Amino acid sequence: EPEVTQTPSHQVTQMGQEVILRCVPISNHLYFYWYRQILGQKVEFLVSFYNNEISEKSEIFDDQFSVERPDGSNFTLKIRSTKLEDSAMYFCASRFSGSPSTDTQYFGPGTRLTVL
Amino acid sequence: AQKITQTQPGMFVQEKEAVTLDCTYDTSDPSYGLFWYKQPSSGEMIFLIYQGSYDQQNATEGRYSLNFQKARKSANLVISASQLGDSAMYFCAMREASSGGGADGLTFGKGTHLIIQP
Protein backbone atom coordinates (compact mmCIF):
# COMPACT_ATOMS: atom_id res chain seq x y z
CA GLU A 1 0.00 0.00 0.00
CA PRO A 2 1.49 3.37 -0.97
CA GLU A 3 2.44 5.65 1.88
CA VAL A 4 3.94 9.02 2.61
CA THR A 5 7.55 8.84 3.75
CA GLN A 6 9.60 11.41 5.64
CA THR A 7 13.29 11.82 6.35
CA PRO A 8 14.96 12.11 8.72
CA SER A 9 12.90 10.60 11.52
CA HIS A 10 14.72 12.76 14.06
CA GLN A 11 16.76 15.92 13.50
CA VAL A 12 18.73 17.73 16.16
CA THR A 13 20.02 21.20 15.36
CA GLN A 14 21.45 24.26 17.01
CA MET A 15 19.38 27.41 17.33
CA GLY A 16 19.90 29.66 14.34
CA GLN A 17 20.76 26.84 11.96
CA GLU A 18 18.84 26.01 8.81
CA VAL A 19 17.06 22.69 8.52
CA ILE A 20 15.38 20.96 5.60
CA LEU A 21 12.75 18.33 6.26
CA ARG A 22 12.00 15.99 3.42
CA CYS A 23 8.87 14.19 2.36
CA VAL A 24 7.92 11.88 -0.47
CA PRO A 25 4.14 12.07 -0.93
CA ILE A 26 2.08 9.26 -2.39
CA SER A 27 2.96 9.18 -6.07
CA ASN A 28 -0.34 10.13 -7.73
CA HIS A 29 -1.32 12.71 -5.13
CA LEU A 30 -1.58 16.34 -6.13
CA TYR A 31 -1.99 18.28 -2.90
CA PHE A 32 0.70 18.44 -0.25
CA TYR A 33 0.70 19.72 3.30
CA TRP A 34 2.93 20.37 6.27
CA TYR A 35 1.67 20.26 9.84
CA ARG A 36 3.44 20.52 13.15
CA GLN A 37 2.70 19.13 16.59
CA ILE A 38 4.44 20.59 19.60
CA LEU A 39 4.90 17.90 22.23
CA GLY A 40 1.63 17.15 24.02
CA GLN A 41 -0.39 19.57 21.91
CA LYS A 42 -2.70 19.36 18.95
CA VAL A 43 -1.68 19.13 15.35
CA GLU A 44 -1.49 22.52 13.63
CA PHE A 45 -1.69 23.28 9.92
CA LEU A 46 1.29 25.10 8.44
CA VAL A 47 0.95 25.20 4.67
CA SER A 48 -0.64 23.57 1.66
CA PHE A 49 0.89 23.27 -1.80
CA TYR A 50 -0.67 22.56 -5.17
CA ASN A 51 0.48 22.97 -8.74
CA ASN A 52 3.92 24.11 -7.62
CA GLU A 53 2.76 26.94 -5.45
CA ILE A 54 1.50 27.61 -1.97
CA SER A 55 -2.29 27.43 -1.76
CA GLU A 56 -2.74 28.45 1.81
CA LYS A 57 -0.59 29.10 4.83
CA SER A 58 -1.33 29.61 8.48
CA GLU A 59 -0.09 32.44 10.67
CA ILE A 60 2.57 30.06 11.98
CA PHE A 61 4.13 29.85 8.53
CA ASP A 62 6.13 33.07 8.63
CA ASP A 63 9.10 34.21 6.55
CA GLN A 64 11.49 31.76 8.16
CA PHE A 65 9.58 28.87 6.57
CA SER A 66 9.57 27.88 2.92
CA VAL A 67 8.39 24.88 0.93
CA GLU A 68 9.55 23.46 -2.33
CA ARG A 69 8.88 20.59 -4.67
CA PRO A 70 12.32 20.33 -6.26
CA ASP A 71 11.49 17.35 -8.44
CA GLY A 72 8.59 15.06 -9.23
CA SER A 73 8.73 13.16 -5.99
CA ASN A 74 10.10 15.22 -3.09
CA PHE A 75 8.38 17.91 -1.06
CA THR A 76 10.52 19.86 1.41
CA LEU A 77 10.03 22.20 4.33
CA LYS A 78 12.90 24.57 5.08
CA ILE A 79 13.26 26.46 8.32
CA ARG A 80 15.81 29.16 7.68
CA SER A 81 16.92 30.09 11.18
CA THR A 82 15.59 27.71 13.78
CA LYS A 83 14.33 28.86 17.17
CA LEU A 84 13.83 26.86 20.33
CA GLU A 85 10.07 27.05 19.83
CA ASP A 86 10.38 25.29 16.46
CA SER A 87 11.00 22.06 18.34
CA ALA A 88 8.09 19.84 17.35
CA MET A 89 7.02 16.86 15.29
CA TYR A 90 6.56 17.89 11.67
CA PHE A 91 4.14 15.90 9.57
CA CYS A 92 3.87 15.85 5.83
CA ALA A 93 0.54 14.83 4.28
CA SER A 94 -0.80 14.37 0.80
CA ARG A 95 -4.17 14.12 -0.88
CA PHE A 96 -5.18 12.93 -4.30
CA SER A 97 -7.74 15.44 -5.51
CA GLY A 98 -11.46 15.76 -5.68
CA SER A 99 -13.60 17.79 -3.38
CA PRO A 100 -11.36 19.18 -0.68
CA SER A 101 -13.87 18.42 1.99
CA THR A 102 -14.09 14.77 1.11
CA ASP A 103 -10.66 13.67 0.09
CA THR A 104 -8.56 12.15 2.82
CA GLN A 105 -5.14 13.48 3.69
CA TYR A 106 -2.64 10.72 4.40
CA PHE A 107 0.11 11.54 6.83
CA GLY A 108 3.73 10.52 6.91
CA PRO A 109 5.39 9.18 10.06
CA GLY A 110 6.75 12.59 11.02
CA THR A 111 10.14 14.17 11.66
CA ARG A 112 10.91 15.06 15.24
CA LEU A 113 12.87 18.31 15.22
CA THR A 114 14.79 19.24 18.34
CA VAL A 115 16.35 22.70 18.50
CA LEU A 116 19.04 23.16 21.14
CA ALA B 1 -13.72 30.04 19.40
CA GLN B 2 -12.56 26.46 18.99
CA LYS B 3 -13.55 24.92 15.69
CA ILE B 4 -13.10 21.36 16.97
CA THR B 5 -13.78 20.48 20.59
CA GLN B 6 -12.85 17.20 22.18
CA THR B 7 -14.00 17.32 25.78
CA GLN B 8 -12.40 14.10 27.01
CA PRO B 9 -8.67 14.56 27.60
CA GLY B 10 -8.37 10.93 28.73
CA MET B 11 -10.44 7.78 28.94
CA PHE B 12 -9.94 4.37 30.49
CA VAL B 13 -11.97 1.51 29.01
CA GLN B 14 -12.01 -2.21 29.67
CA GLU B 15 -10.94 -4.43 26.83
CA LYS B 16 -13.80 -5.67 24.63
CA GLU B 17 -16.10 -2.84 25.67
CA ALA B 18 -17.35 -0.27 23.18
CA VAL B 19 -16.07 3.28 23.56
CA THR B 20 -17.36 6.60 22.30
CA LEU B 21 -15.00 9.53 21.78
CA ASP B 22 -16.73 12.88 21.61
CA CYS B 23 -16.18 15.56 19.02
CA THR B 24 -18.16 18.72 18.38
CA TYR B 25 -17.38 21.19 15.65
CA ASP B 26 -18.21 24.72 14.66
CA THR B 27 -18.61 25.87 11.09
CA SER B 28 -20.93 27.98 8.98
CA ASP B 29 -19.78 26.25 5.81
CA PRO B 30 -22.52 23.97 4.39
CA SER B 31 -19.89 21.69 2.83
CA TYR B 32 -17.31 20.20 5.13
CA GLY B 33 -15.63 16.96 6.01
CA LEU B 34 -14.91 15.39 9.36
CA PHE B 35 -12.04 13.01 9.97
CA TRP B 36 -10.73 10.90 12.81
CA TYR B 37 -7.06 10.04 13.15
CA LYS B 38 -5.30 7.72 15.58
CA GLN B 39 -1.87 8.55 16.94
CA PRO B 40 -0.19 5.67 18.77
CA SER B 41 2.78 6.25 21.05
CA SER B 42 5.10 5.78 18.06
CA GLY B 43 3.81 9.13 16.78
CA GLU B 44 2.41 8.50 13.32
CA MET B 45 -1.03 9.77 12.32
CA ILE B 46 -3.29 7.00 11.06
CA PHE B 47 -6.47 7.85 9.18
CA LEU B 48 -9.49 6.01 10.59
CA ILE B 49 -12.74 7.30 9.17
CA TYR B 50 -14.32 10.16 7.22
CA GLN B 51 -17.80 11.72 7.23
CA GLY B 52 -19.00 14.25 4.69
CA SER B 53 -21.51 16.91 5.63
CA TYR B 54 -23.89 15.77 2.91
CA ASP B 55 -23.61 12.07 3.64
CA GLN B 56 -26.99 10.62 4.56
CA GLN B 57 -25.62 7.67 6.47
CA ASN B 58 -23.13 7.42 9.28
CA ALA B 59 -19.71 6.28 8.14
CA THR B 60 -18.40 2.87 9.18
CA GLU B 61 -14.96 1.26 8.73
CA GLY B 62 -14.62 -2.12 10.39
CA ARG B 63 -14.81 -1.61 14.16
CA TYR B 64 -15.00 2.17 13.74
CA SER B 65 -18.20 4.07 13.19
CA LEU B 66 -18.99 7.73 13.26
CA ASN B 67 -22.12 8.92 15.04
CA PHE B 68 -22.86 12.02 12.98
CA GLN B 69 -25.50 14.35 14.36
CA LYS B 70 -25.49 17.32 12.02
CA ALA B 71 -28.01 19.48 13.88
CA ARG B 72 -25.98 19.13 17.05
CA LYS B 73 -22.70 19.53 15.16
CA SER B 74 -21.26 16.42 16.68
CA ALA B 75 -19.22 13.64 15.10
CA ASN B 76 -18.44 11.09 17.77
CA LEU B 77 -16.19 8.12 17.05
CA VAL B 78 -17.43 4.75 18.24
CA ILE B 79 -15.00 1.87 18.58
CA SER B 80 -16.69 -1.47 19.05
CA ALA B 81 -15.09 -4.37 20.92
CA SER B 82 -12.04 -2.40 22.00
CA GLN B 83 -8.62 -4.04 21.89
CA LEU B 84 -5.38 -3.34 23.74
CA GLY B 85 -3.93 -2.04 20.48
CA ASP B 86 -6.55 0.70 20.40
CA SER B 87 -4.69 2.54 23.16
CA ALA B 88 -3.59 5.80 21.55
CA MET B 89 -4.40 9.48 21.10
CA TYR B 90 -7.43 10.10 18.90
CA PHE B 91 -7.88 13.34 17.02
CA CYS B 92 -11.00 14.70 15.40
CA ALA B 93 -10.40 17.06 12.46
CA MET B 94 -12.42 19.13 10.04
CA ARG B 95 -11.90 20.45 6.56
CA GLU B 96 -14.13 23.30 5.37
CA ALA B 97 -14.55 23.23 1.62
CA SER B 98 -15.19 26.87 0.93
CA SER B 99 -12.17 28.31 2.71
CA GLY B 100 -9.41 29.05 0.24
CA GLY B 101 -9.45 27.31 -3.05
CA GLY B 102 -9.55 23.67 -2.26
CA ALA B 103 -6.13 22.84 -0.96
CA ASP B 104 -5.98 24.09 2.58
CA GLY B 105 -5.53 22.25 5.78
CA LEU B 106 -7.34 20.36 8.46
CA THR B 107 -8.26 21.88 11.80
CA PHE B 108 -7.63 19.45 14.63
CA GLY B 109 -9.02 19.08 18.11
CA LYS B 110 -6.80 18.63 21.14
CA GLY B 111 -7.31 14.91 21.17
CA THR B 112 -8.45 12.19 23.56
CA HIS B 113 -5.95 9.82 25.13
CA LEU B 114 -7.63 6.42 25.17
CA ILE B 115 -6.23 3.65 27.35
CA ILE B 116 -7.63 0.15 27.01
CA GLN B 117 -7.22 -1.92 30.13
CA PRO B 118 -7.07 -5.74 30.13
Image (cartoon, coloured by chain):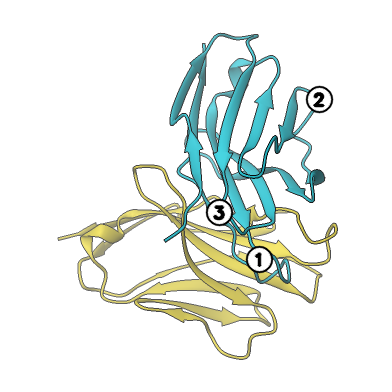
Chain colours: A cyan, B yellow
What residue sits 79% from the left and 37% below the top? A59
- Contact, mark 2 vs mark 3 (Cβ under 8 Å): no
The residue indicated by pointer 2 is: A63
The residue indicated by pointer 1 is: B25
Q: Amino acid at mark 1?
A: Tyr
Q: Chain of mark 2?
A: A
Q: Position of residue A75 (x, y in %)?
A: 64, 39
Quadrant location of the N terminus of chain A in the rendered image:
bottom left
Q: Amino acid at mark 3?
A: Ile
Identify which residue, A63 or B112, lies in the foreground: A63
The answer to which image quadrant residue A22 occupies is top right
Q: Is residue B52 left or right of residue A53?
A: left
The residue indicated by pointer 3 is: A26
Q: Amino acid at mark 2?
A: Asp
Residue B43's place in the image compared with B47, above or below, is: above
Q: Position of residue A20 (x, y in %)?
A: 61, 24
Residue B37's place in the image compared with A48, above or below, is: below
Q: Residues within 10 Å of mark 3 (few under 14, many from 20)?
A: many
What residue sits 45% from the left and 43% below the top? A109
What residue sits 50% from the left and 72% below the top? B76
Tell us which disc is closer to us: 2 or 1.
2
Mark 2 or 3, nearer chain start: 3
Residue B99's place in the image compared with B67, above or below, is: above
The answer to which image quadrant residue B42 occupies is top left
What residue sits 51% from the left and 11% below the top? A116
Q: Is residue B3 left or right of residue A22?
A: right
Distance between mark 2 and mark 1 Cα atoms: 31 Å
Q: Secondary structure at mark 1?
A: strand
Q: Give a yes or no on whether discs 3 and 1 share a subunit.
A: no
